[in-house]
Amino acid sequence: MSHRRLLLAAALLFAPFAAVLPAATPSRPNIVIIIADDLGYGDIGCYGATDIPTPRLDRLAQQGRRFTRAYAPASTCTPSRYALLSGEYGWRQPEKKTAILDGDAPLALDPTRPTLASQLQKAGYFTGLIGKWHLGLGDGSHPIDFNGDIKPGPLEVGFDSAFFLPATVDRVPTVFIENHRVSGLDPSDPIRVSYQKRVNPEPTGAERPDLLKMGAEAIHSNVIVNGISRIGSMAGGRTARWVDEDIADLLAQRSAAFIESHKNGPFFLLLGLHDPHVPHAPNARFVGKTKLGRRGDAIAQLDWTVGAVIDALERSGVADNTLIIFTSDNGPVLYDGYYDQSAELNGSHRPAGGLRGWKYLPYEGGLRIPFIVRWPGHVKSGVDDRLLGLNDLFATLSTITGQSIAKGVAQDSLDQSKVLLGKRGPAIRTELVEQAISNTLALRSGDWKLIPASPQQQVSGMGAGADPNDNRWTHSIIRQDELYDLAKDPSESTNLASRFPERVAAMKARLQAIRRGK
């Protein structure tokens, strides 16, 4: 039995003379982080969207603080989520650990090192993960057996409970894992998963496109689950397979149950939404909520899910003492492998809010994200343009909950508690390293941004042009240094590298120093 659970057992033994756990107080709030998947800076109303109804998120922003210069540390999911939990840039690890991981990839986080979850656990919080994980499972010494105990995983890096999707909704296995086991698995129908070979004898999406709800490119045209073809091959586990249209309801129900069970707190809930990542398959009651097709409807569904979580906090009587953070793991993408007309029906909507680029790319559209904070009576409402990154949450929430950070831990995380609470003062963070696919790095320093030439690396993604409605799938190489003055040119349309060679050289040197840990 862990030391923490021994203390809990002792407290129960001597009740009512001892409290079971320290209750949530104004200095020790419950914490809920809701992180969307591929939601862009301009995808919701309070950030300028007019074609997608997001009343719950708009209300959250009105009641709390909305940040306009918040950044994902990477323009793809796994390294951003890694940085959020570890307080360390994902590119400090070998790329295979923090690339866009498959559903059977090894755990990216080191179980021997603190995470945001274990830090809050140490402070007396009951910590829970619900929804998307995408940080790997197992130790990599052997293939994962999805029919037995699956570990190490979230429970080994600081979560007391976990109900999660292993990776993305377009990857196998298409099942939920609860703690260490696949939820709802029938032992007589064991699961087999492979990204190297075919293990399912049934037709694939490439072979039987007539069985699909939406067509897909080759990499997404393997095993068919719920009428949608996926990346990778999977056999068995039929009773455990999810129904895409029901995922949002399930996440909302699980979140409400978690909040009610731990309302005496303090608790920490990390809720990883699957929307609006592909495949876009919103519940029938959200279909047609927008004129933008499946992706727009998925964002309307996302807004409902956030509202359901807030409703659960209010029903449990803990809304006023809960710090809510809503954000996204990277920028948006319209076409990402499925032929669902998200690009064709996008109309005049600007998912990246007019910024250049999309998911995968080193430009602002792939990295700047919505970031809303609410804690009634503690977070000052308003709009804040001070710079922050998801990697700062480790140090920031440690301070808010009275925790110190050991030397060498969370080296890329800054204490932004004053900024988060809306206290006056200068920006705490003045520079940020931004990662694109293939470990392409950029440096944001004040209002200046440098993307060094990396001709040996290919940057793949959507809409490399400045026009946020350029939906072409592009493969671009950073052939020359790119320097932008974001204060005057937020759309990164004018490369100033040739005009300011000294600044380019200085920023390159600074980027190298950061890479060396200085």
Image: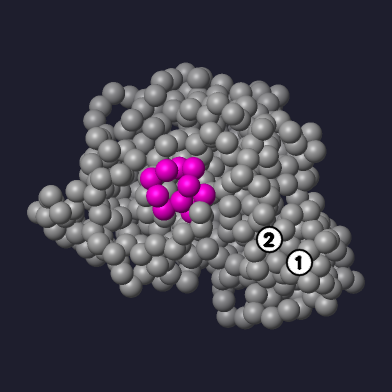
The disc placed on residue 205 is 1
Q: What residue is rendered at 48% in x and 47% in y?
A: 470
- State whether the magenta stretch is mostly helix, strand or loop: loop
Furthest residue in direction right, as rendered = 188
- Any magenta on residue 159? no
Q: What residue is rendered at 58% in x and 59% in y?
A: 134
Q: Position of residue 507 (x, y in %)?
A: 18, 54
Determine whether 70 is above or below 177 in the image: above
Compute the Cα span from label 2 to label 1: 8 Å
Q: Which residues are magenta?
A: 462-471
- Any magenta on residue 466? yes
The reply to whether callout 2 and callout 1 are in contact (CB within 8 Å) is yes
Q: What residue is rendered at 46% in x and 51% in y?
A: 463
Give the quadrant of residue 155: bottom right
Q: Which residue is mark 2?
A: 216
Q: Nearer the viewer, residue 23 or 84?
A: 84
Q: Nearer the viewer, residue 352 or 439?
A: 352
Left or right: 138 with respect to 148? left
Q: Nearer the viewer, residue 288 or 62?
A: 288
Identify the amino acid type marked 2: Ala
